[in-house]
Amino acid sequence: MRIETPLEDILATRKGFTIDSHSSTEVILIHGIGGTASGNKPLGDFIASHNGFDVVGICLPGHATKPEDLFPVTYEDWAKAIKDACLEARKTHAKVLIVGGSLGGLLALQAAEEGVVDGVVEFSAPLVYKHPIFNAAGFISHFKKYHVWKEYQYVTKEDAEKAKLVSYDRLPYKSVQEMNKLQKEVKQNLSSVHCPCLAIYGGQDVLVSQKGSMKMLSKAKIQQLQTELFVNSGHTMLWGVDKEAVFAKISDFLTNI
């Protein structure tokens, strides 16, 4: 994974950022589990420049510090942070839209289910897992604290240093279990999504089942649902081979809400 964002920009945005375009529409961006707001900054810049919308990059509780800080955090803490952000945005904006990836995708869907946003984009939201270890996170957490991301390979030392600032290199199994609790709630309430919804998945995602997740969304009969599959993309779509096309798809969808 090549991280092109300069180190100083990552340090400045990892705990959250705001792009003020003086718009009546605000877009809230949510990162994935273990990630930081800086991972969404390139997408935020694209939306601000192409759509002219205000953008807020959220940093979820327990993130952008150290992995140990995730242990006391529950999925309710993450959900409250997003709902509070949506309600705050509503005070000053006529339209509130939300975009989230992975865990952020689940939280974005939950916000849509609760009716606090006018449109939602989720990418790589784990409605159905492909990687079996995540289903067993609750059991594993009794014997092992962390899942270490051995899959990540970095070309240079600089990329490795940047990556640890964009995303934790290890993740508490307890936190994955919290995400599983959120997943269960979101799946039960998918039919409550009544706003426009775009779901994007990558054909090379080794963590999330794109077929299973998209099938679940289809069965929920969300009236304004659009789905998109990028066959060459993996889980981290905003950094992958199709990132420009993913950015454009999200931007076009937001324009038409």
Image (cartoon, rainbow, N blue to C red):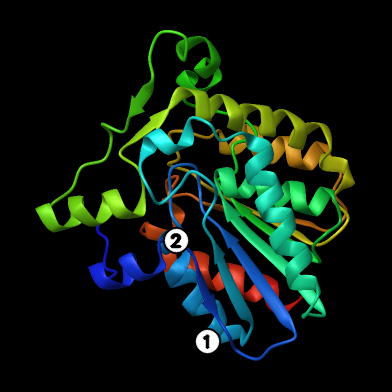
* Element class at badge 2: loop
- Residue 225: x percent and y percent? 78, 55
**Rendering coords of residue 67 (x, y %):** 38, 37
In this orientation, which residue lies closer to the viewer: 252 or 91? 91
Q: CA distance from mark 1 to mark 2?
A: 22 Å
Amino acid at dot 1: Ser
Crowding around mark 2 (Cα neighbors within 10 Å: few <14, some 14 to 19, many 20+) is: some
Left of 93 or right of it: where is 206?
Answer: left
Camera-near label (1 vs 2) is: 2
Crowding near the residue tagged with mark 1, few <14, some 14–19, many ≥20 C-alpha atoms within 10 Å = some
Looking at the image, can residue 156 be seen?
no
Judged left or right of residue 182, residue 17 is left
Residue 181: image quadrant is top right
Q: Which mark is residue 15?
A: 2
Q: Amino acid at mark 2?
A: Lys
Position of residue 226 in the picture relative to residue 252 (left or right): right
Residue positioned 43% across, 54% down in the render = 36
Picture residue at 49% right of the left edge, 70% below the top: 43
Question: Mark on residue 49?
Answer: 1
- Identify which residue is drawn at 38% across, 48% down: 65
Q: Earlier in the sequence, mark 1 or mark 2?
A: 2
Q: Quadrant of residue 191?
A: top right
Residue 18 can be seen in this image = yes
Identify the residue at image location x=81%, y=66%.
118
Quadrant of the frame with the C terminus: bottom right
Residue 177, above or below 250? above
* Label 1: which secondary element: helix
Residue 64 in picture, x, y percent from top left:
40, 51
Of all residues, the one furthest to the left in this rendering is 157
Image vertical order of residue 132 relative to residue 250, above or below: above
Q: Position of residue 223 (x, y in %)?
A: 88, 54
